[in-house]
Image (spheres, helix red, strand yellow):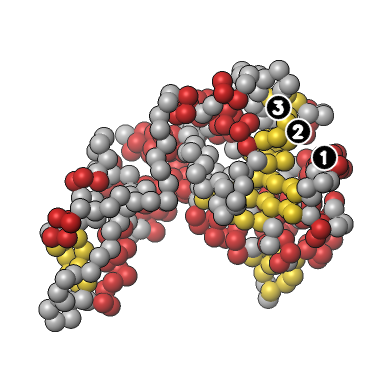
Amino acid sequence: MEMQFVTQLVLERAGVVLDDEKRDFVETRVRDCARKFNFESGQILVEHLKSSHYSRLHRQLIEELVDDDTHFFRDFPVFKNMRHELIPKLLERNKDSKKLRIWCGACSSGQEAYSIAIMMKEAIPGLKDWDVKIIGSDMSKKLLEKAADAVYSQAEVSRGMPAPLLLKHFHKDVTKWVINDDHKSIVEFRQINLNGKWDELPGKWDEKPVFDIIFLRNVITYFSRSVRESLLRKLPHHMHEDSYLILGKSEQPKDDSGLFEVSGEDKYSTYQMAPDRPTLAASKPQEEADGEEAPATGSAPVAPDEEADSKVLVTFRYKDLQSVMDMVFRDVDPEAHVYLGLKKAPMPGEQLFQVVNTVPDWAKKKDD
């Protein structure tokens, strides 16, 4: 029952299928998470998750269970084809705007995004004259933090990184290798669940995120059929007529929608939108096709005045702030609004802080 709950959680929230062949992997990761978050066993951790609303703890377990294996220049012929075939065509097409936009979905700890940046540098001698932006996205905050640091061990750079490129595009920091700043300056990272609405995809950009190349490699094969089809239907909204979609080796857009066709040789797993594809209106994401209004972003509901007298749950000394906040927020829904306020009168003695009900009845989800 514990295995069934965990696999269903990952399927519902991430769209990833964990079959029986991965049972040992799942059990190991659950035990590791239990130790990390101070639960006595994996079973106790799962029982806690089963009895709680979706929270940061659920999300952290999901991140641990989604495959994060990656390395530099994985399937090198794909990058070689990108340098000698795709980029020259894009340079000609975009010679007036001098803009290139690339999205690396499921980038894990950043190796693929930086491999793209290095290949761009190698392919375009005058790269500084171009406006190039690369987005690397993943659902794991931990992996994205590592990607943003761009610091890799000798073992990590030894997987796929040719020695000449390593010496040219990295610098040594004691026993670690750090990618050069000119690559970090064009790569941005976003926390995005591909099974979600991609609200974070634009980031700080002033323009609609439409990409010349989308890397979605070694990821769709893990999704359920329905999630894969939904994802593929959303991609054309972020592509030009001549944009390229690059999938993993032996992966195909098996959505039977007629949206994509092979571009060039099939061995490079490169696709473009089919000329006779259905119209974008017909291929809108399901939530849009159903006429559901998307919630407004960037604003939170205003708490009513009567919430100022919410019941006090706990008070604590300042030195205990970190541990208490960790305890409180561990089980809060990552999408919830948390209200922080001041008391009208100071607390007695050294009791400087108090926690009130962070989810008032009026703000609770209807299905909860």
- Whole-percent x and y of residue 225? 52, 25
Residue depth check, mark 3 versus mark 1: number of the one nearer the observer? 1
Give the residue type at disc 2.
Answer: Asp
Give the residue type at disc 1.
Answer: Arg
User: Which sits in the foreground, 291 or 52?
Assistant: 291
Q: Residue at x 80, y 60 (%)?
A: 128
User: Which sits in the foreground, 221 or 359?
Assistant: 359
Mark 2 residue element? strand
**252 vs 362: above or below:** above
Q: Is residue 77 left or right of residue 361?
A: right
Q: Residues within 10 Å of mark 1 (few under 14, many from 20)?
A: few
Q: Is residue 332 left or right of residue 33?
A: left
- Please identify the quadrant where the N terminus is shown: top left
Q: Residue at x 64, y 26 (%)?
A: 253
Single out the residue that lies furthest toward the bottom.
349
State the residue position of label 3.
Answer: 273
Q: Residue at x 14, y 55 (%)?
A: 306
- Please identify the quadrant where the C terminus is shown: top left
State the residue position of label 2.
Answer: 242
Mark 3 residue element? strand
Mark 1 residue element? helix
Mark 1 touches mark 2? (CB < 8 Å):
yes
Tell me how far mark 3 sits from mark 2, CA to CA: 8 Å
Disc on res. 328: none
Say which quarter of the image contains residue 46: top left
